[in-house]
Image (tube, grey):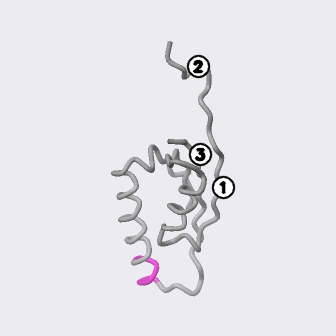
Amino acid sequence: MAEFLVRIVLTRPSALDDDAWTSLLAAEREVGLGYRRRGVVQRIWRLPGTTSNVGIWSAPDASDLDRLLAGLPAFRYMSIEVEALALHYLEATE
């Protein structure tokens, strides 16, 4: 499995009313919790004062990660940056 640093900024579109936005966020939470249970989202942090988060995601390759990100209910309202991660020599086991 490969690990990726994923930065997500979620922007609420003005066309969505409060009920639609609340429903979308609830669906997003359910999918996100599923990704956590499956080990796709290894770690995730909110960036205080923003609608952003940063996390360590795990997937077999970048194409699979792309599919997983596209599966997020709020995907079309997200700006996403992905960086592949490589093992650092300080992390290598002896």
Q: Please, what is the three-letter code of the amino acid marked with disc 2? A: Leu
Most common secondary structure along the magenta stretch: helix
Say which residue label 1 marks: 81
Say which residue label 3 marks: 5
Spot the residue most to the top. Answer: 94
Q: Residue at x 59, y 29 (%)?
A: 87
Q: Residue at x 45, y 49 (%)?
A: 41
33 vs 51, left or right, is left
Q: Quadrant of residue 30?
A: bottom left
Residue 38 in magenta stretch: no
The location of residue 65, given as percent across then percent down, is 55, 55
Q: Secondary structure at mark 2?
A: loop
User: Does label 3 or label 1 sit earlier along the sequence?
Assistant: 3
Circle 1 packing at 10 Å, graded few (<14), some (14-19), many (20+), is few
Span highlighted in magenta in the image: 18-22
Circle 3 packing at 10 Å, graded few (<14), some (14-19), many (20+), is some
Q: Residue at x 40, y 55 (%)?
A: 35
Say which residue label 2 marks: 90
> Label 3, label 1: how many angstroms apart (C-alpha)?
8 Å
Q: Secondary structure at mark 1?
A: strand
Q: Please, what is the three-letter code of the amino acid marked with disc 1? A: Glu
39 vs 69, left or right, is left
Q: Are marks 2 and 3 in contact (CB under 8 Å)?
A: no
For the residue pair 10 and 39, the one nearer the viewer reads as: 39
Task: Count the marks.
Answer: 3
Q: Please, what is the three-letter code of the amino acid marked with disc 3? A: Leu
Q: Is residue 63 above or below residue 1?
A: below
User: Does label 1 or label 2 sit earlier along the sequence?
Assistant: 1
Q: Residue at x 41, y 76 (%)?
A: 22
